[in-house]
Image (cartoon, coloured by chain):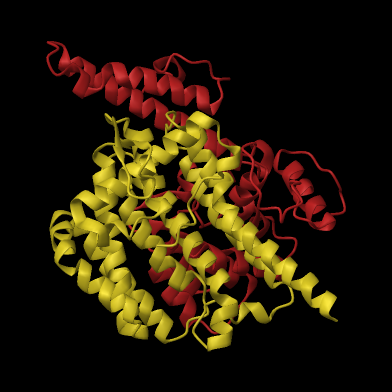
Chain colours: A yellow, B red
Amino acid sequence: MFGYVTANELELKVKEFKKYKAYYCGLCQCLKNKYGVSGQMTLTYDMTFLILLLTSLYESETKANSFRCMIHPVKRTAVLQNEFTEYAADMNLILSYYHLKDDWEDERKFFALTGSTLLKRKVKMAVGQYPRQAAVIQRELNQLSEFEKTKSDNLDEPAGCFGRLMEELFVYKEDCWEEVLRRMGFYLGKFIYLMDAYEDLPEDMKKGNYNPLRKMSENECYEESCKEIFCMMMGECAAAFEKLPCVLDVDILRNILYDGIWKQYQKFQEKKSEELTDDKKSI
Amino acid sequence: MTKNPYDVLKVSPNASDDEIKRAYREMSRKYHPDANVNNPLADLAEEKFKEIQEAYNIIMREREQSSYSYGGNGSGNNNYHSDSYNYGSGNYGDYQRNRSYQGNGGYDEPQNAQMQAVYNFINNRRFQDALNVLNRMSMRSAQWYYLSAMANMGLGNNILAKDHAGQAVNMEPNNMQYRQLLNQLSWNSQRYQSNPYGGNYANGNNTCGTGNMCCDLWILDTLCECTGGDLCSCI
């Protein structure tokens, strides 16, 4: 996935940051234990958010542990794991697999082929365990590549595919929170897809690739329109979140939803304004 | 449920949303079926657990409803229903489920059989069917854009929905119903942008405005109107 759903670490308290990190490392370790190094490569912050959210909602028993990690071999790393860690690891794997497979079929990227081949055998198990989620992921990614082939410039269409995919992952069990979780996941998914398109636009234009924002980018108020759309998506997502009785780690969750989620966007804006001043200097 | 939901959760009606969430947590931990497996009164506990869950949902729904109900100032019939955005199985939003479109004063009376069909589909949450009928129509009136906005919202197409609601307002600026839909579609976004939890989406200049003074003024005015007041009578 894309890694947009992350915390603004500077605004977190130290203990919150440690906890967030421990869930992240917990997911990383779980991926490694279940699916080996190739599984570990699929690690994202997006799924860490899902673990935090479901843990806060269901308050499941969480185990604290520590281990030596390859990347930081000297210090022991603290990890937090619970039933959602495994769930997120499985979802992460299924999603990465289909995503890579799509990339290979559409664009013949070599990395995508090796990636999907490596994951193929492992993903079978996860698909068998979560048929509902796996079926929706497959269906929506297929639909998405249809929209990409027909070069749809109706933003709701391709973004909606990713939204429906995401909402399915958010539904861990079909209970009284399902409706709100779906709404939250749907708009978060749309946000992620559109943010990705927004960031990729300059390169897609260069290479002549499909991008749903291409037509809109010809408008004068492109930047404002984009920001408005992003705020609309997060507005719906956050409104749904605020309806859930999340108390545990709510500060981390809000940090991500109201602040961290804009980190990439902010970086992109800074890069753009730098390029602009560079251009002016050279003139 | 006949009991007052606030009494069930043992909180004051003035409690903040977070206080309600904490109260819900405390009560649900105590009565959760998993915590009462060996309790001879497990049945009673489960009943209580359900009651708590229901009370929580009622309060949250009521609060969302009151934040939307800025139309009509107490006239009642224009209140947006709590379930207005709710996702049912496959439906991405549902506007005014309890609002009937027939015979409400005449000014937006369906013009023909096709429009009537669209109204019916929307009332029954069959948004895709509504959209199919709309797409077959050649005349794009303000009403057409209004209905298209509603159907698209129901399907989760919030970008197109807002576009079309805006179009309807442009074509008939004096229609309050169209304006209300547009306001409603912007409501969560505005609330998100004025959140107290930080956020750096304001392009580096960490103010809570949009960066455009006119736009800020318009939003502020809209928000004032939502609560019944008015900042600039000219907008």
Q: What is the residue that sits farthest to the top in this orientation?
A: B40
Residue closest to the far front = A74
Query: Which corner quadrant holds the N terminus of chain A?
Result: bottom left
Q: Nearer the viewer, residue B85 or A94?
A: A94
Q: From the viewer's perspective, is residue B199 above or below residue B130? A: above
The residue depicted at 66 percent of the width and 47 percent of the height is B193
Quadrant position of residue A214: bottom right
A219 vs B110: above or below: below
* Residue A142 drawn above or below residue B187: below
Describe residue B25's horizontal placement relative to residue B47 as left or right. right
Residue at the (37%, 61%) spot, across then down: A164
Say whether residue B76 is visible. Answer: no
Please provide percent x and percent y for residue A165: 34, 62
Horizontally, residue A233 falls left or right of residue B221, namely left
Does any portion of residue A179 appear in the rendered image?
Answer: yes
Q: Residue at x 31, y 53 (%)?
A: A169
- Measured as percent of width and height from the top left, residue A74 is found at 37, 40
Which of the 4 image quarters holds residue A43?
A: bottom left
State the quadrant of the C terminus of chain A.
bottom right
Q: Where is residue B38 shown, x and y percent of the image? A: 12, 14
State left or right for residue B189 relative to residue B41.
Answer: right
- Viewer-nearest residue: B70 or A164: A164
Hey, which residue is sitting farthest bottom in the picture?
Answer: A208
